[in-house]
Amino acid sequence: MQNISLAELPEGKTGVITSIDTTSPTAQRLLDLGFVPGTQIKAMKRAPMGDPTTFEIRGYQLGLRRSESEIVEVEI
Amino acid sequence: MSQEQKKKITPQSIFLIGNPNSGKTSLFNAVTGERHHVGNWPGVTVERLEGVTHTKNGDIQITDLPGTYSLTPATPEEGVVLTAIDEAAHGTVLNVVDSTNLIRNMFLTTQLIEIGINPVISFNCYDSFTQQGGKIDLQKFSNLTGCEIYPTVGRTGKGVPALVEYLGKRDISEITAKASSALSLPEKWLKTAKEAIKLDNLRWETATATQRYNAINSLCKPTKDNPKLEEIRKRLCEELSAEKGKKVTPSTLACDLAEDRYHRIERMVKVCATVPEKSIPEGQQKIDKFLVHKYLGIPIFAALMYFVFWTTFTIGQYPMDWLEALVNLLAAWVGGFMSDGILKELVVEGVIKSVGQVIVFLPNILILFFWIVLLEDSGYMSRAAFIIDRTMKSMGLQGRAFIPMVMGIGCNVPAIMATRIIDSKFQRMLTMFLVPLVSCSARLPVFILLCGTFFPENPTIWMFVLYVIDLIVLMFLGHFISILSNRVEDSPFLLEMPPYRIPTPKSVWNMLKEKAMHFIEKAGTVVLAGSILVWALQSFPIIKDEELSFDYVGQKTVIEAPFLAKKAEIEKSKLTDKEKEEKLAEIDSQIEDATSEINFKKNEEKTERSYLGRLGKFMHPAFAPLGFSWKETVTLIPGFFAKESLVSTLAVLYQTEEDSDEEGAEAKNIENRKKLAVAMGKNGMTPLKAFVYMLFTLLYVPCIATVGILWKESGSTKFTIFSLFAYFGLAYIISLITLKVGEIIAARGSNGAQEAAVVIIALIAAWVLLSRLINGLKGKTSAVGCGCGCEGCNKCVNKRDKR
């Protein structure tokens, strides 16, 4: 068990969200989208140039840039 | 809201609210049927669609609001929803919920119920939901939420009649949320929200929906200037910590509320529904593996884009030619009924040909949008944006801007219309601003002619240099603007990957019909007016032949006389008809050659004395620093009408023939270019100045059609005027720099190839420097950040949410 930033979650790996940096302006939107602590999230695919990455959360797929996924902390 | 407006809002005023891609608009179309009238693009000028439908209980009015994940706006167009919410609270909120993504979609529903709105819920995509094994006890669901629930399938219209019937008879007593809803705000939060709203001298019970929303929202955001609110927030944290047995701090309140909302939804859904063990469908994953593949993704994308581009502009050329021929036929036909004179000129050259200028864009627009609908509706567009996002980021744009930017190479007009696919308004405006700077195919003839004329050894290299400069300008400008407006971190990049779907012919047809009408109605009028204006400038004042400084007509008669005598001789001779015809044709072409010079001179004088020529001469001092003579200055005016007419105006002014497309004309074209080079050279034109002239042509202002569509699509006159000045200033500065740098290089004396190499190296160096500058700026702005020193800015989320 260790905590890493969502941006570091390897492709194909699943983690559980532990916290989100609420000082970032993106935080509110991610929370609204269901990025709340305790939620499972899987890194699906990184774009050919390494950024952005698609994540599977709550049964849907969302692409996030590194600058957005960085503010989420996950436990793997 | 005025009293009068208030009266108009009844429970039969329906406001569609839902997540993006929840099928809101298709439901809107299904409900309004053929009767809907589309006001404008959502998110542009009107920012919402309105329609009316008739039910047996009377008419209902439907407003489609932009899709949003939450009431808390992250982009300006989502802000539209929040602004409309008070209005909607007096009518009926129809909350479209994508039932295949139930829990996330219910988040918005929860927010609505929390602020006292009782939405009617449409469980959209219900067929997919049941197919995936989803089950739901609608009665129980309705009882728990206190909302009316209607399962619908927007694409087929299934379930819509029942929904419409209910909406027609909905009662005013049903529009407020039941206090007992399972999704209502929990007691502790509600109590605190009521305290917070009192700080603004309001009462929760009588407050409007937005006031309640703001009260809840203020609890989630730290404030420095409101100690009373901070105290309330602290107390809430203590109570919540005690209740949940874990630490809740003021900074995590937002997180706690979101978590709580999701828990309420999950608890409720668990009781009354079986949500399919949801993961991304197998098929979707398989297709994604291929289309978003590490190595294959980009080639597939590139091939698709190339195909779209090719069909739009290469295949699209055929119908364009047909339309042009048709317009010419029409002009000839109409002209046949009229006697020569200024009225005929106006009708034929002014009106009919200008109308032709408008409709000639239609094939491009229709073909491009046919592909865009397919790409968008099938779900590929999001994947494409995903793949190319990184590259577009280097221009300060996002992935979806790729299509408009690439299409701009073909023609700026459909490209600007294509910016519609970008969901963030800021990004859309930025793309719209940049597209006219992309070198379109109408600018190509100018480059081909002049590069061929002035750089006969290696025209391609110089054309390439032009494109590289263009690219650098675009990248720098895009970056610079997004940094200056501090929007890089501000507008979150969220790219939902929708499931793959097969587009319906109906949606394709609707889109195409709408596009065509939109273009003709909106941009058409502007283009028409502009075309007639330029025509008038060229044709007035009317100079009669006898008013010219030289008796061109008399001279022409003198030149023609011996040929005409020969012709008469042939007519009389005893040759066969066929032989006569051949000989006559031969003489006709001889006449043409002999009189061409006199014709050119006549045209030149007429152009010079027209308002166009006078305007050009008047403007000339401003352009002299760039090394343009008055002739080049004049060409800029028709160039505004259509870039390719620069070439024909140059030809008139420098007395050469235009390039011909005919077979075997190659040698003649080369000769013409030599003539042009000599003529322009006599007038002081050097290769360097020609290059500067091309660069200026590339950047100065887009053609009138592009300006028209830019104005209509941006919905802002200010934006359009600002853009025009910006393009012009940019073109001027860059041209001037190029001229000065070029003069220094030229003074050292070197051959063309070396010069080109030097220029390319200089460009690379410029790019490195500029990107350093950009990075420097980035560091600065992010250090300043948001929240301090930006009181005047209303763009950032933090501030907008504060009351």
Image: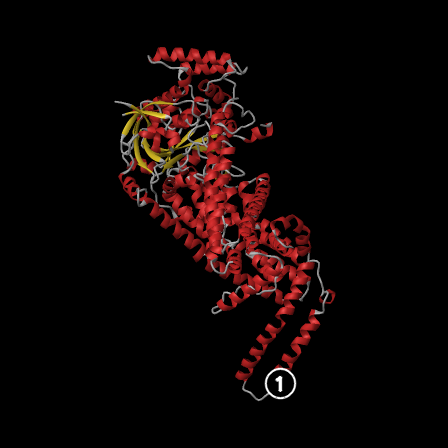
Count of numbered marks: 1
| Placement of A14 over or under B748, stated as above or below | above
Label 1 sits on what residue type?
Glu
Q: Residues within 10 Å of mark 1 (few under 14, many from 20)?
A: few
Pick the residue in front: B349 or A67.
A67
Q: For this view, does B395 lie left or right of residue B337?
A: left
Q: For this view, does B724 lie left or right of residue B15?
A: right
> Can residue B561 be seen at all in this image of the molecule?
yes
Image coordinates of residue B670 in percent, x first then y, are: 51, 65
Q: Quadrant of residue B351?
A: bottom right
Pick the residue in front: B496 or B695.
B695
Q: Quadrant of residue B353?
A: bottom right
Spot the residue most to the right: B547
> Can residue B463 be seen at all in this image of the molecule?
no
Q: Quadrant of the N terminus of chain B?
A: top right
| Placement of B753 over or under B209, stated as above or below | below
Q: Chain of mark 1?
A: B
Image coordinates of residue B688 in percent, x first then y, are: 55, 53
Image coordinates of residue A32 in percent, x first then y, are: 40, 26
> Measuring 27% from the left and 29% from the top, which residue is drawn there?
A14
Spot the residue most to the left: A1
Q: Which residue is mark 1?
A: B569
Q: For this view, does B383 lie left or right of residue B63?
A: left
Pick the residue in front: B169 or B756.
B756
> Measuring 44% from the left and 36% from the top, which residue is drawn there?
B164
Image coordinates of residue B287 in percent, x first then y, are: 29, 43
Query: Dot 1 lies on which element?
Result: helix
